[in-house]
Amino acid sequence: MGEIQRGESLLFLTDEQIRQGIEAIYFAYRSLLSEPDRILETMEYGRAHHRAVHFINRAPGTTVTNLLEILGVTKQSLNRVLRTLIEDGLVESRIGKHDKRERNLFLTDKGRALESELSDPQRERMRRAYREAGPEAVSGFRKLLEAMMDTELQIKYASMRENKDT
Amino acid sequence: MGEIQRGESLLFLTDEQIRQGIEAIYFAYRSLLSEPDRILETMEYGRAHHRAVHFINRAPGTTVTNLLEILGVTKQSLNRVLRTLIEDGLVESRIGKHDKRERNLFLTDKGRALESELSDPQRERMRRAYREAGPEAVSGFRKLLEAMMDTELQIKYASMRENKDT
DNA sequence: TTGGAGTGTCAACAAGGCTGACATAGTGTA
DNA sequence: TACACTATGTCAGCCTTGTTGACACTCCAA
């Protein structure tokens, strides 16, 4: 490839560097799923259930529509998952107060237990990586991931962090 | 978000920071798949084909077993994909020279064309993010992703970079 | 010569995406 | 009030891509 290197090196923009970055995300993402996957194998739930439970935990009272937007799936797909979670008593669906068409979703104690079981090892892995790489790496990591996101997801990501930053 | 505080502060290790990191990867990974997904919709291939083509392109002559390890799927699953790619003339499978049981996989011109079509927009997104975030962020990003990987994948990742680092 | 490795293939199944169609309740506006 | 629209749920059927299990063949190496 032919990036011309002027004064300050642009070597970090070579095709090779770009490719390695893409592969790094792929491998890291897969590793991040490995623990929950292993646990999920022993139960009647799948990744889709984990994702739903994760985001309901993060934003208790969220609506179905909001969850649909965050997860980027169809309502039929989400509903299949949500139905089993509600039937099994992991998620509670309350009719909206302002708008009775809406359903506000909450985790029950049982739901929170599942969320922990699945996410704790994931967070532990992440914590180890954070610690190992140090605060500066973490900051660069976050910066880059945000820059990679579609504007739409960037906005959702930002809004999920509201009132949560220390 | 707040500036990372130096000194004794371990604020970057709070649960909230960890969770945000996990979500950031999730959203970024999804964004990274969005362009190829859109293109794949118009053809008879899927993500699995993209992955296969990507790694064959990266390591021309690689064997089936090696590809299986990198992709982490079963041979039946990979074979289904590989078969269509070979039938369609995107991948060439040559009997190994040293070990005639092995198949060495190569992209044809047509295969390289598909790889480009799918990966170029992805690399373009990545390049933009790299440029926007700057070299230091890139370095932190890479460092953290590597720290997140399972040892096994870390090794594969490292070996893929051999003789490719500038 | 024999066991194991590398590969290919068949069949059956599951998870979790998708579309399309239709139903119901509730909201908001003309 | 009537009507259009929104939020949600559900049925049916399809696709991709993962899985297991079984079996076959070739070839390498001890």
Image (cartoon, coloured by chain):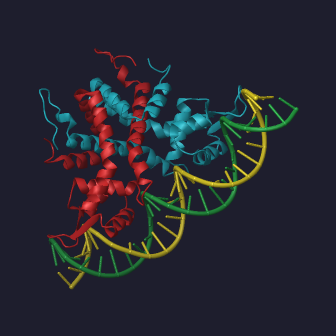
Chain colours: A cyan, B red, C yellow, D green
In percent of width and height, residue B64 lies at 27, 63
What residue sits 17% from the left and 32% below the top? A10
What residue sits 48% from the left and 40% below the top? A118
Q: How many marks?
A: 0
Query: Is B77 or D7 nearer to us in this picture?
Result: D7
Q: Quadrant of the N terminus of chain B?
A: top left
Q: Quadrant of the C terminus of chain B?
A: top left
In percent of width and height, residue B104 lies at 22, 65
In the depicted structure, whether residue A111 falls above or below residue A44: above
Quarter of the image holding residue C24?
A: top right
In percent of width and height, residue B53 lies at 30, 57
Say whether residue B78 is left or right of residue B136: right
Quarter of the image holding residue B115?
A: bottom left
What residue sits 40% from the left and 26% below the top? B17
In percent of width and height, residue A4 lies at 14, 35
Can residue B69 be seen here? no
In the depicted structure, whether residue B157 falls above or below residue A129: below
Say whether residue B51 is left or right of residue B94: right
Can residue A119 be seen here? yes
